[in-house]
Image: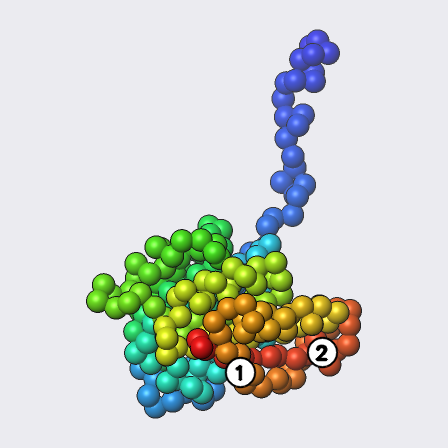
Amino acid sequence: MSDVESLTGGNLFDEPEDFRPPPPQAHFAHYERESISSKSKSQKKEIELRLVGSSPLWGHLLWNAGIYTAKHLDKHPELVLGKNVLELGAAGALPSVVAGLIGAKQVVCTDYPDADLIDNIKHNAEGLENVAVEGYIWGNEYDDIIKHLDDMEDKKFQLVILSDLVFNHTEHDKLLKTTEDLLAKNGKALVVFSPHRTHLLDADLAFFTKAEEEYNFNAEKIEMVNWTPMFEGDPGPAEIRSRVYAYYLTLK
């Protein structure tokens, strides 16, 4: 065998089966609805939420803000029941699933059009005929969102959910413009977040100042609660990282 043949033939460049670790597998998070109103269309308590194994878009975790949002919807079913609901940046889509169970007229659940992420959201929404899933990039045209609403309506949503999105400081304008354009006159946007980077809390809160000063919104703080921080080893005071802020935005 020549030197060339010895270098180019056979399986010289084949990787052993264990050369690279397999990609992280999808996993499940268990959520139990606590305060289900008698008005809710479904009394289903247990939700097994499938999460992607890993995601550069943070869809692999069930965030405190998402849990808070789901609890808030169950406590206030009037926000959802018989109404059009839009969720932006849904990740695992727990709020959208709960909104569907409560009895929203139509939920449109969106996140970045990454195939694995969108397929995973569709899995979580399976069986909920009032939940549609779409890939959507904030600030783009709304055709794929509003096509799910009845032709006789004004193509608006009575509730827009923004759960753990305000850390995207460069995207504040796109989020606010999308919300302003798609929110019904008598509707509310529910904005919930945790300050994962404590030194940027002021930049997080600037979202609400911008909403009032540069867009057509009134911002109302619902509450700030302290839960267990998502990541114990993260830098910054644990008291700040444990916070969950909740606000309503309404059109002026």
Q: Residue at x 54, y 74 (%)?
A: 212
The disc placed on residue 71 is none
Q: Nearer the viewer, residue 177 or 46?
A: 177
Residue under label 1: 220
Residue 79: image x %, image y %? 39, 81
Mark 1 Cα shell of 10 Å, populated few (<14), some (14-19), many (≥20): few
Specify the farthest residue to the front.
213
Residue under label 2: 240
Q: Quadrant of residue 204?
A: bottom right
Helix, strand or loop at mark 1: strand
Mark 2 Cα shell of 10 Å, populated few (<14), some (14-19), many (≥20): some
Q: Residue at x 67, y 68 (%)?
A: 203
Quarter of the C terminus within the rendering:
bottom left
Mark 1 or mark 2, earlier in chain: 1
The kind of residue tagged 1 is Glu
User: In the rendered view, would you say 132 is above or below 15?
Assistant: below
Q: According to the image, what is the colour scheme of the structure?
A: rainbow
Q: Residue at x 62, y 85 (%)?
A: 225
Q: Let me know if residue 185 appears in the view.
A: yes
Residue 110: image x %, image y %? 44, 61
Quarter of the N terminus within the rendering:
top right
Specify the farthest residue to the top.
2
Residue 169: image x %, image y %? 62, 62
Q: Is residue 33 left or right of residue 128?
A: right
Residue 115: image x %, image y %? 46, 50
Measured Cα–Cα span from mark 1 to mark 2: 20 Å
Helix, strand or loop at mark 2: helix
The kind of residue tagged 2 is Ile
